[in-house]
Amino acid sequence: MSPGWVNDENAALLTDLYQLTMLQAYHREGLNGIAVFDLFVRRLRERNYLIACGLDSVLHYLEHLHFSQEALDYLSTLPMFKPEFLDWLSGFRFEGDVYAIPEGTPVFADEPILQVVAPLPQAQLIETFVLNQITYQTGIASKASRVIHAAQGRTVVDFGLRRMQGTDAGMKAVRASYVAGIEATSNVLAAKVYGLPPTGTMAHSYVEVHDLEEDAFSAFAELYPGTTLLVDTYDTLQAVRRTVALHKLLGDRFHVGAIRLDSGDMAELAHEARIILDEGGLEHVKIVASGSLDEFAIAEMLARKAPIDGFGVGTKLGTVADRPYLDSVYKLAEYNGKARMKLSKRKSNLPGRKQVYRFFEQGRMVRDVITAYDEPSDGTPLLQCVMKGGRRTAAGTVTLEQARAHARDSLRQLPDHLLSLEETDRPYPVEVSHRLRETLSRLEDELEAKASQIVNPSDIA
């Protein structure tokens, strides 16, 4: 039996069944006009900003999207799919256009992060995969950005693989976190694939299999000069004292770069460990902390002036523990040149093709305006054409390092109060242009009038 890995040959089936049943219905009815779909987040849910991420995964998927013979053979076993539809699927490819806000850009509620302009069946099928990738990676990048801000310039590395929800998450979370600013990862495969520095120390089990803690420390340091020692297996401060004693006994044969605290009152332990290290001539040895850390724990430790030089952040970052999902949606905004929308007071969407303009004052973001796509504005347009006719454009071939640099520069443009870990009472202004509001109002009136009409059975064909 297959282990269930997703790859380019089976990714077309990584979708909800109703995407395929709608696809067959579209094909049967000849509904192949150009559709516009927007992916956006309805509300931020205790975030002051989000960091757009996941676009690279989406573009790779779209460039390789096809139904393999194995996929078609499986679909043929399902009674709802007709042979002529499966034959049509055999030649299915994505040939549309994609507009997106670049990875690493701060984004806000209701702003299209991604806009797909393609024949209706193509734009419809990709909904599930696109939402899956953009939602998770944007959530991770946004969480990582908060963690890095809380660390106040100290090194942050990823330790989260073992508790992330599956292998794809374990890879994509590292990439998204790197875009947001982490320095390295313990995930060896992610380090290889994305070209990041791999990092790691030792586990408690390594210390435990030795009869004496100092034997574990000396053996590991001899094999890996400059290593980081995990000092909280038994008695944290005693382990730090043993580190000093080994330094005095072995001299240059015992070269340690850092110690790692993983439990207890780490702020207090860091203060005491720093004193022991400094008095023992190990001023150069750094202190790193790990163990269920997030932005709030890091901020609290640094508020206590803890002499910690770096943080290994795992579970609460990799699972976005406080907000494990975004209120993201992928909604039809236009079909065959006519604006479309869902008529709902809490779940509606802005109709028509759009652009998002950002305005700055003295190098800082001050407001965004969502407009019709062809509406002139003096602001900086955020949506860029990243795919044309199913192939990436220059704007869609941004490297990981470029996305990371863009995120770093963009975060410097955020108003300071948005960087607070607490939800601000002054949310970033996102306006809707007068023209787009008129379109929205007119379409709402039309839809409400249609919805209120009394249905006569004889009028139904």
Image (cartoon, helix red, strand yellow):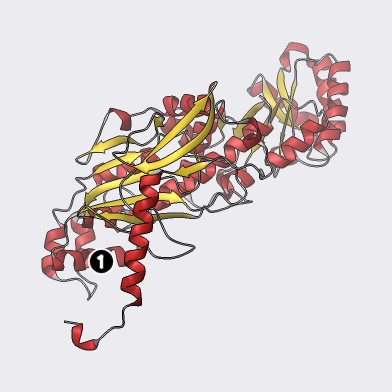
Q: Secondary structure at mark 1?
A: helix
Question: Which quadrant holds residue 127?
Answer: bottom left
The residue at which mark 1 appears reads as 22
In-front residue for pair 340/129: 340
Image quarter (top left, top right, bottom left or bottom right) of the N terminus: bottom left
Residue 170 visible to an observer of this rendering:
no
Residue 279 lies, with reference to residue 1, above or below; the image says above
Q: Is residue 256 left or right of residue 328?
A: right
* Residue type for callout 1: Met
Which residue is painted at 39% across and 65% down in the image? 343
Which residue is painted at 22% across and 49% down in the image? 118
Question: Which quadrant holds residue 311?
Answer: top right
In-front residue for pair 398/10: 398
Residue 423 in percent (x, y) is at 66, 45
Task: Tell me how many marks there are.
Answer: 1
Residue 457 in percent (x, y) is at 23, 87
Residue 75 lies, with reference to residue 323, above or below; the image says below
In-front residue for pair 264/394: 394
Q: Is residue 215 left or right of residue 34?
A: right
Residue 249 in percent (x, y) is at 83, 16
Residue 332 visible to an observer of this rendering:
yes
Which residue is painted at 70% across and 45% down in the image? 292
Residue 340 lies, with reference to residue 454, above or below; the image says above
Question: Within 10 angstroms of label 1, few (less than 14), some, or many (20 or more) residues?
Answer: some
Residue 321 in percent (x, y) is at 62, 51
